[in-house]
Image: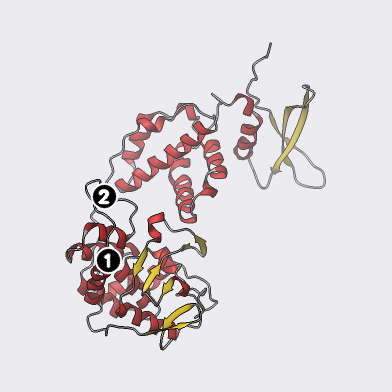
């Protein structure tokens, strides 16, 4: 008859050392292949690293979780331990930007409130009331709820927990305010205050609706100068190269001849001109950081122009608004913005013709660049196509 395995807490003690500083030592039992239990010990860390026993226990909890895998359901585990396991197993599978957002939410909001609570003590109504009390936008609260749900779902998959209390937590979605949209006049004012290469970066954001990480991740080889198209292949956040946000983000985009002329001028000024070089490389040839560009250049330019507070995504919202204003087919809008889905009533549209996408995009580009000349002659350069004067 098999005896049920009890949860093993072990023993954490402070071990004195003569020549070096004291350490925290954890003692426990381990079952060897012969079926006998043998006493083991593990050094958790030095006293200077973990001054109190509580500090050492927090580090120890993940190891103690693995030690008790034979009796996983109903463990007296804190949310901190469950979150640690989620970070270790699930986070590496996500995009770098998503990883950073999850870590920030866990450390700033979730752990301080729920980290020390046992998972079975966390109740739906308490979480719901906590979300309501936070001084955050509704969309941010929805994101916190979603992250908590993911953490508990991870526990269910690994049989650490058999319930997900967040299933019953209600959180109203939506935004606290309507996203800022710039008029064509406002965009021209901002562009007039920007120097290179930031002028060209904002021009791409306004004329193609690219996300900031996608603009930073552009390489010269992403442009097909024979067909005047752009294929967004990657995103870059904090110098780390990753995939685009969605599969639809890789849809090809038309490059209007007026925008191609502006890119040709930027290529001529650049020190880095090879197909594998970054379009907006820094002096060392590496990708720039979009946060510092926004803080040091774009936001001050908007203030000087009298436009007010803006962000990178303001240009994407403005691009979407301009597409609607010029009467672009809704399927064309979806593909130009590279959204994964649209509402069910909009999904009945078939894939838009490339001529329709190019025409709608060109109307937006020429409203932003009214005095630019159109047309760009191109010649082949090996397997790469570049404008004639490049």
Tag 1 residue: 357
The answer to whether 278 appears left or right of 193 in the picture is right
Residue 305 visible in the picture: no
Q: Earlier in the sequence, mark 1 or mark 2?
A: 2
Q: Which residue is mark 2?
A: 347
Along the viewing direction, whichever of 223 and 148 lies nearer the viewer: 223
Q: Is residue 105 above or below residue 366?
A: above
Give the secondary structure at mark 2.
loop
55 left or right, relative to 211:
right
- Residues 54 and 1: in front is 1
In percent of width and height, residue 201 lies at: 37, 73
Query: In this orientation, does residue 47 appear?
Result: yes
- The Cα atoms of the two marked residues, 1 and 2, are separated by 17 Å
Position of residue 66 in the picture relative to residue 380 (left or right): right
Extreme top residue here? Answer: 1
- From the image, which quarter does the C terminus lie in? bottom left
Q: Point out the image quarter for the N terminus.
A: top right
């Amino acid at each position: 008859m098999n005896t049920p395995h009890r949860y093993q807490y072990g023993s954490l003690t402070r071990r004195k050392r003569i020549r070096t500083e004291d350490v925290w030592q954890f003692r426990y039992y381990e079952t060897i292949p012969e079926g006998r239990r043998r006493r083991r010990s593990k050094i958790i860390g030095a006293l200077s690293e973990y001054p109190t026993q509580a500090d050492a226990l927090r580090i120890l909890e993940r190891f103690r979780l693995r030690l008790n895998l034979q009796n996983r359901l109903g463990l007296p585990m804190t949310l901190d331990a469950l979150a640690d396991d989620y970070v270790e197993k699930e986070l590496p599978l996500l995009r770098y930007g998503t990883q950073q957002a999850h870590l920030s939410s866990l450390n700033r909001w979730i752990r301080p409130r729920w980290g020390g609570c046992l998972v079975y003590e966390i109740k739906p109504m308490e979480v719901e009331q906590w979300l309501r009390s936070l001084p955050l936008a509704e969309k941010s609260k929805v994101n916190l709820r979603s992250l908590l749900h993911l953490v508990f779902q991870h526990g269910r998959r690994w049989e650490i927990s058999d319930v997900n209390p967040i299933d019953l937590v209600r959180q109203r979605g939506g935004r606290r305010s309507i996203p800022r949209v710039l008029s064509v006049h406002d965009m021209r004012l901002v562009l007039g205050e920007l120097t290179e290469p930031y002028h060209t970066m904002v021009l791409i954001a306004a004329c193609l609706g690219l996300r900031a990480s996608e603009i930073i991740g552009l390489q010269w080889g992403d442009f097909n100068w024979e067909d005047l198209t752009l294929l967004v292949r990657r995103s870059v956040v904090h110098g780390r190269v990753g995939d685009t946000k969605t599969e639809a983000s890789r849809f090809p985009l038309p490059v209007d001849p007026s925008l191609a002329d502006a890119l040709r001028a930027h290529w001529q000024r650049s020190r880095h001109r090879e197909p594998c070089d970054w379009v907006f490389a820094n002096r060392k040839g590496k990708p720039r950081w979009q946060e510092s560009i926004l803080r040091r250049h774009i936001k001050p330019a908007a203030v000087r122009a009298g436009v007010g507070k803006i962000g990178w995504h303001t240009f994407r919202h403005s691009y979407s608004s301009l597409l609607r204003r010029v009467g672009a087919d809704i399927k064309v809008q979806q593909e130009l913005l590279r959204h994964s889905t649209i509402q069910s009533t909009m999904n009945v549209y078939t894939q838009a013709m490339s001529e329709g996408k190019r025409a709608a995009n060109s109307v937006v580009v020429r409203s932003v660049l009214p005095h630019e000349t159109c047309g760009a002659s191109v010649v082949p350069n090996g397997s790469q196509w570049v404008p004639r004067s490049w």
